[in-house]
């Protein structure tokens, strides 16, 4: 089974997971770790998560900041069958959630393509250049 762990400082991971669930529906294979909010050390939270998933499961780990302590701890503790993506944002998570569906494993090539797509969503919006919305679609 393919799984995703979102881990970030404070309540960012929980918030991203909440927004993702609102848009994509609740996905049982997605979990989160809110780092540094409890007395439980981050290392134990990571160990507990990996103990809760099957050895054959592919785990996609998403963290908030490359040089952050959450990312560094997960890089040290990740399993062989896991991949780490950092710089978490909602467009990235939406794309990654799609990768969880289907039977084929997630490849590094596909993961890099998804990161490139999400990177395109990062921009400065100049109101004079933005076309006016033509419908009432809420996203």
Image (spheres, grey):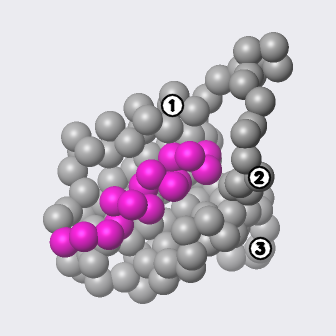
Spatial CA span between label 2 and label 3: 41 Å
Please say if 71 is above or below 41.
Answer: above
- The quarter of the picture where residue 65 lies is top right
Q: Give the main secondary structure of the magenta stretch.
A: helix
Q: Extreme front residue here?
A: 134
Q: Residue at x 41, y 32 (%)?
A: 116
Mark 3 and mark 1 in contact (Cβ < 8 Å)? no
Residue 38 shown left or right of residue 13 in the figure: right
Q: Residue at x 78, y 67 (%)?
A: 37
Q: Extreme right residue here?
A: 127
Residue 133 shown left or right of residue 13 in the figure: right
* Quadrant location, the N terminus: bottom left
- The quarter of the picture where residue 99 lies is bottom left
Instruction: Tell me the magenta residue range.
Output: 89-103
Q: Earlier in the sequence, mark 2 or mark 1?
A: 1
**Numbered tag placed on residue 119 in the rendering:** 1
Residue 126 shown left or right of residue 47 in the figure: right
Instruction: Bin the neighbour count of mark 3 within 10 Å (Cα to Cα): few under 14, some 14-19, many 20 and up.
Output: few
Q: Residue at x 50, y 38 (%)?
A: 118
Q: Extreme left residue here?
A: 104
Q: Please state which of residues 132 and 5 is positioned toward the viewer in this rendering.
A: 132
Q: Please state which of residues 137 and 100 is positioned toward the viewer in this rendering.
A: 137
Which residue is denoted by mark 2 in the rendering?
Answer: 136
Query: Where is residue 82 shown, x and y percent of the image?
Result: 31, 60
Q: Is residue 33 magenta?
A: no
Please say if 73 is above or below 3.
Answer: above
**Numbered tag placed on residue 38 in the rendering:** 3
Q: Nearer the viewer, mark 2 or mark 3?
A: 2
Query: Where is residue 43 shown, x and y percent of the image?
Result: 55, 67
Q: Earlier in the sequence, mark 2 or mark 3?
A: 3
Query: Where is residue 23 shown, x and y percent of the image?
Result: 62, 65
């Amino acid at each position: 089974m393919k799984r995703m762990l979102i881990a970030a400082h404070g309540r960012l991971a929980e918030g991203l997971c909440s927004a993702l669930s609102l848009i994509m529906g609740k996905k049982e294979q997605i979990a989160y770790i809110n780092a540094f909010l409890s007395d439980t050390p981050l290392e134990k939270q990571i160990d507990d998560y990996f103990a809760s998933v099957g050895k054959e499961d592919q785990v996609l780990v998403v963290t908030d900041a490359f040089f952050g302590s959450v990312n560094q701890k997960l890089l040290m503790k990740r399993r062989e069958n896991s991949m780490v993506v950092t710089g978490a944002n909602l467009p990235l998570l939406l794309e990654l959630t799609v990768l969880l569906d289907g039977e084929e494993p997630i490849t590094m090539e596909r993961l890099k393509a998804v990161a490139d797509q999400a990177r395109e969503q990062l921009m400065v919006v100049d109101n004079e250049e933005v076309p006016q919305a033509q419908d009432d679609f809420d996203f």
